[in-house]
Amino acid sequence: MRGQRDTDADWRELGAREPYWGVLTHADYLSQNLTPERLDAFYASGAAYVDDLLARFARLYGATPTGAALDFGCGAGRLTEAMAARTASATGYDISPGMLAQARKRGGRALYVDALPDGPFDWINSFIVLQHIPPARGLSLIEALLARLAPGGFLSLHLTIWRDARLEPARGWRSLARPVVRSLRPAPPVGVISMYDYDLSAVMRRLTAAGVGETTLVPTNHDGHHGVIILGRRQGAAAP
């Protein structure tokens, strides 16, 4: 779409400068503050998140994913490494060469790629990724991910859907001038993090069409940006 921000360029820049802070925006993970202990804590937080997802799957479906897993927007492999340790295999996909380089340097079991693999996958996961992708493109990516989900496969998909009033764009008379002001004001530099909210009904329509029927929503709140983790399982028998 004309005029739409190239968020891929932002994440390539962030991955080159701050590959860990770009994943978790905490001062501990800035390059100048990073220590081996903090790096271990970074990956330990990913293991805790993955274990929580698996526990939720077990409660909801009486089973957990054991086959091939895909981590969409894997960054430096914070979640992918934990997924690889708990399934037959895990692939991390990202568009940031800098983040992929750090993930590979970790030396774990996961495979890291810069092209979306074909699948099928027994588990597809994405966390704090789609919120940085314009929704028109993000919905197409969700469709691509669902096409790669195996029958009986598990889904854990995070996106933001609304924000606190203080984070809303200016309204009233300012909104009338916004198109003019935007055309005169220089664009933010490459590397600025953008946030986008999704229409949850549009997402659920795509899940239903792909056979992901019964779902559970886990609320999230990142500094006033509110979202959900959608947990689901595709209908059909899982591969033996």
Image: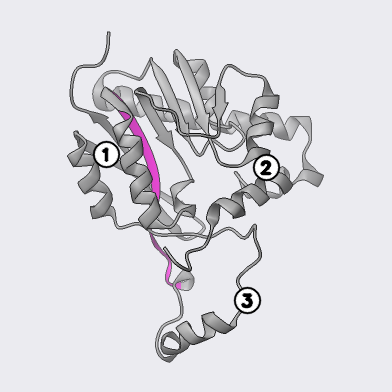
Crowd tier of the residue under label 2, counting other residues whose Cα lies within 10 Å: few below 14, some 14–19, many 20 or above: many
Task: Tell me if residue 143 can be seen.
Answer: yes
Depth check: 148 or 54 in front? Answer: 148
> Which span of residues is magenta-colored?
153-165
Give the Cα separation between the discs numbered 2 and 1: 31 Å
Locate residue 135 relative to residue 94 in the image: left or right. left
Q: Amino acid at mark 3?
A: Pro
Looking at the rendered image, the quarter that the C terminus falls into is: top left
Query: Residue beneath label 1, please?
Result: 216
Task: Tell me if residue 21 can be seen.
Answer: no
State the image quarter where residue 46 is shown: top right
Depth check: 54 or 105 in front? Answer: 105
Q: Nearer the viewer, mark 2 or mark 1?
A: 2
Locate residue 217 relative to residue 10 in the image: left or right. left
Of all residues, the one furthest to the front in this rendering is: 2
Taking 62 as reference, is 179 above or below it? Answer: below
- Residue drawn 65% across and 26% down? 104
Asked if disc 1 and disc 3 are in contact, CB closer than 8 Å, the reply is no
Q: Residue 151's spot in the image, x, y percent?
A: 24, 23
- Residue drawn 44% across and 16% down? 87
Crowd tier of the residue under label 3, counting other residues whose Cα lies within 10 Å: few below 14, some 14–19, many 20 or above: few
- Residue drawn 18% across and 40% down? 209
Query: Residue beneath label 3, please?
Result: 186
Q: Residue 231's spot in the image, x, y percent?
A: 31, 36
Circle on res. 19: 2
Q: Main secondary structure of the magenta part?
A: strand
Q: Residue 144's spot in the image, x, y percent?
A: 34, 39
Crowd tier of the residue under label 1, counting other residues whose Cα lies within 10 Å: few below 14, some 14–19, many 20 or above: some
Residue 138 in the magenta stretch? The answer is no
Give the Cα separation between the discs numbered 2 and 3: 26 Å
